Amino acid sequence: MINFTRSFDSAWERMHVILFRPFDFGKWCAIGFSAFLAGFLEGGNGFNYRYNQNIGHSSSDTNLSWQKIHDGVMEAVRQWNTTATAYGLIFVGVFILIVILALVFAWLGARGQFLFLDNIVRNRAAISWPWSSYSTQANSLFLFHLAMIVISLAIFVPILVIGVVMAIPLFQQDRWPHGGEIGAFIALGVAYLAVSIVLSVILFIFREFGVPLMFRHRTLAWPAFWASMKLVGEHPGSIALFVLLRIAIAIGLIIISLAVCCATCCVGALPYIGTVILLPALVYIRCFTLDCLAQFGPEYDVWTVDVPPPGPGAGVPQISPPPPPG
């Protein structure tokens, strides 16, 4: 069982040593830059969080909004004409641009993961050396995320297609679903939500445990993925508690982000600036994760990355891939 109290205390001490003993503004900014890049693969940097401001609307407002959406869709269908081709080309161009930018940010995020780990574990502000030294692992991490995107699309697209096919007759008949149709839409929504949660948890565990193992043993993404899944199989209780604690910590980070953002008149919401301001919290969270991981055994201790193993092949977590289907 993970001793979370020890990890909390150890992470606090490590964060102080890295950032405040002594305080170096240049080092702070360099580590902040690596954390900023790492955030591209985690869905957020600093204060890049969104929240819903429309929770308090009444049911009548909701019905009115849905009616407006329905009327707008029907009107768009009726007004469809030859200009659709031009708009379609614009849409395709914008879509391709977004995809290219997303791939670039994901690639930078993969590099940033190893930059941030290197700066924390080795207590320094290096960019060039870890950028080149861990290029193989970073490229493998990038390709792994692309593979996970393809797998996700293979699961989600059929669900969305079924939903669209079910919704088209409703728009054509200008009516709302009823009876079994409502149940079918609910089933699709539940399936979509369940798959989203499972994939999110799997990717989260891999990012928290698998990526540090890639860094520790200079292995590629898929072996590290199976090693992190092996931890889940061997220590399900500890991993479940860890995930719940990290969710609580993430909620606390969001609250702190919003508070500091208001205190700085939204200056902290600017890219990179927010990451630099929140750097103590980001370093603390990463140290907490690494300290929890180290408790599973010496082969999982990322803090000993520069310590040679006691013998040939010792200290490297091994796991065989699952057998091929059939």
Image (cartoon, helix red, strand yellow):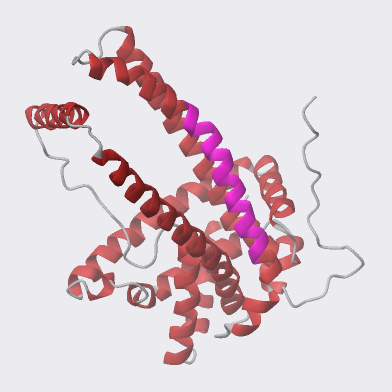
Horizontal side of residue 11 vs 45, given as left or right? right
Q: Position of residue 292 (x, y in %)?
A: 59, 59
Answer left or right for 157 relative to 231: left
Vertical placement of residue 305 versus 24, above or below: above
Q: Is residue 294 visible?
A: no
Residue nearer the viewer, 325 or 261: 325
Looking at the image, can residue 311 be seen?
Answer: yes
Residue at left offset 27%, top offset 39% = 84
- Residue 322 vs 162, above or below: the answer is below
**Dominant secondary structure of the residues highlighted in magenta in the image:** helix
In magenta, the rendered stretch is 138-158
Could you tell me which quadrant the C terminus lies in?
A: top right
Q: Is residue 18 magenta?
A: no
Query: Residue 113's spot in the image, x, y percent?
Result: 56, 67
- Residue at 57 percent across and 76 percent down: it is 120
For this orientation, the residue located farthest to the right is 312
Q: Which of 310 and 316 is in front in this view?
A: 316
* Residue 291, quarter of picture: bottom right
**Residue 157 lies in magenta, yes or no?**
yes
Say if 305 sits above or below 75 in the image: below
Instruction: Locate residue 104 relative to residue 74 in the image: left or right.
Output: right
**Residue at the top extreme of this rendering:** 179
